[in-house]
Image (cartoon, helix red, strand yellow):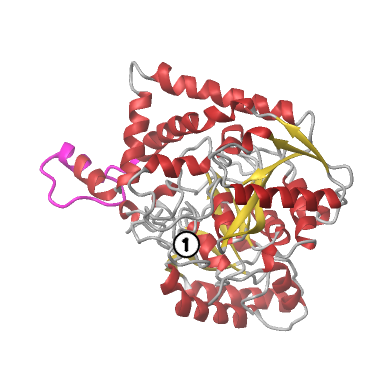
Amino acid sequence: MHQMTLAEIARGLADKKFSSEELTKVLLARIAQLDPQLNSFISLTEDLALQQAKAADARRANGESGALLGAPIAHKDLFCTQGIRTSCGSKMLDNFKAPYDATVVAKLAAAGAVTLGKTNMDEFAMGSANESSYYGAVKNPWNLEHVPGGSSGGSAAAVAARLLPAATATDTGGSIRQPAAFTNLTGLKPTYGRVSRWGMIAYASSLDQGGPLARTAEDCAILLQGMAGFDANDSTSIDEPVPDYSASLNSSLQGLRIGVPKEYFSAGLDPRIAELIHNSIKELEKLGAVIKEISLPNMQHAIPAYYVIAPAEASSNLSRFDGVRFGYRCEDPKNLIDLYKRSRGEGFGPEVQRRIMVGAYALSAGYYDAYYLKAQKIRRLVKNDFMAAFNEVDIILGPTTPNPAWKLGAKNSDPVAAYLEDVYTITANLAGLPGLSMPAGFVDGLPVGVQLLAPYFQEGRLLNVAHQYQLNTDWHTRTPTGF
């Protein structure tokens, strides 16, 4: 059962080959057996899962149907879940139980999805390796000595190890696509505003976006269908009709114009990854796609712009965690200032503190114009580059990451080296575009991803290309040894 995709589970449940309760028990047992190797879960919700599975079986017995009805998933631990710990991977929220469900959680529950638990993550979604979590690093199931990517590394590791078929995740600078690439999964960052951020604890509000992590594009289409849609509670949610993502999966790629930016193939890209990307291009050409070289001239400025904007927004968003209203509070504070200082100093880890300091500096008087305002101008230039490119092509293709997953601890002493691994992913967040990573092969036994970018609200196009590619390749079917 654990090898089934979401689509296969939906068919099996519809054909009464097994019940949701039976499947849920199998996966809960598998998590108990294997997750100690991975550390991919922060909280398990066995009682809730069995309750939801029984309810889903009853709904099916009454004639209801649906691709997510009775399907087991997990949520990244920054989606608020009523009465269940929502920690954000931080000591600061270790004791926080949300009083409500995030919109994404509520929508998927209404569709009948079964929540197995909350997955591990970089603290407050800040990181590219899932090593900054208060609950310890997550291991990559393809090689337990390597990182699974971040910040959605817990969701990625759990799905890659076949502990469950799919999970929710979030992407601020590549935190869905990069872990997908490192663990041989398909991960989709939707257009900014396509998925509600209400109840999703914020890192950088203008960049954060929730999305699905699964083994196939078909499964991502199913999960995104349940997540997407307008939400009046979220002022950044866009009132745009949600298409049937599964309906367009089998469209022909004949004549599809694919742009390949020349800036992607610079000295920083591992040549073995470059070869795999070119192989992917050849596969898509066989399916009728037309390849064209394009240019994204301002890409070189994206990382410095991102690492001003994101920390600036983080410093503002995290100011609410002060030891007064909820979350961690230091013991025996001498006065109010001591309460603030010690609660934040003890509650936040080093990476979060680093980004708060950078962001506060960039927003401070005398530096706002020099750093934050300039970064926002670069952001507009990056967006303009994409708009010009999409006048010529339908999608943009390139590597998801410049290197395969690195060893645990390898970049801990040099945060900037880890930041540079986001070079191909952050531009989509700066511009608000949808992006997808899909499996493209292996380097030294570690998975590699190819990234696709599309114009606003063209998630269906990305899923269609990825699905057609996966019908003609088998990278996505490979399973890590031991899982």
- Which secondary structure lies at badge 1? strand
Determine the residue positioned at 49% across, 28% down: 305
141 within the magenta span: no
Q: Is 326 on the left-hand or right-hand side of 3?
A: left
Q: Main secondary structure of the magenta part?
A: loop
- Where residue 426 sits, quadrant-wise, is top right
Comparing 96 with 405, the one in front is: 405
Above/below status of 387 relative to 284 = above
- Where residue 394 sits, quadrant-wise, is top right
Q: Is 448 on the left-hand or right-hand side of 326?
A: right
Above/below status of 192 relative to 380 = below
Residue 455 visible in the shown view: no
Comparing 264 with 195, the one in front is: 264
Q: Is 32 on the left-hand or right-hand side of 232?
A: left
Label 1, on which residue? 119
Specify the quadrant that holds the C terminus.
bottom right
Q: Position of residue 369 (x, y in %)?
A: 42, 16
Comparing 9 with 47, the one in front is: 9
Q: Position of residue 20 (x, y in %)?
A: 64, 78
Q: Residue furthest left?
A: 334
Which three-letter amino acid code belongs to the residue tagged 1?
Thr
Determine the residue positioned at 68% across, 68% down: 477
Specify the quadrant that holds the N terminus.
bottom right
Residue 252 visible in the shown view: yes
Determine the residue positioned at 68% across, 35% down: 261
Q: Position of residue 165 (x, y in %)?
A: 62, 68
Above/below status of 347 relative to 394 = below
Q: Position of residue 211 (x, y in %)?
A: 60, 51
What segment is highlighted magenta in the picture? 319-340
Q: Is 122 on the left-hand or right-hand side of 460?
A: left
330 within the magenta span: yes
Determine the residue positioned at 17% across, 36% down: 337
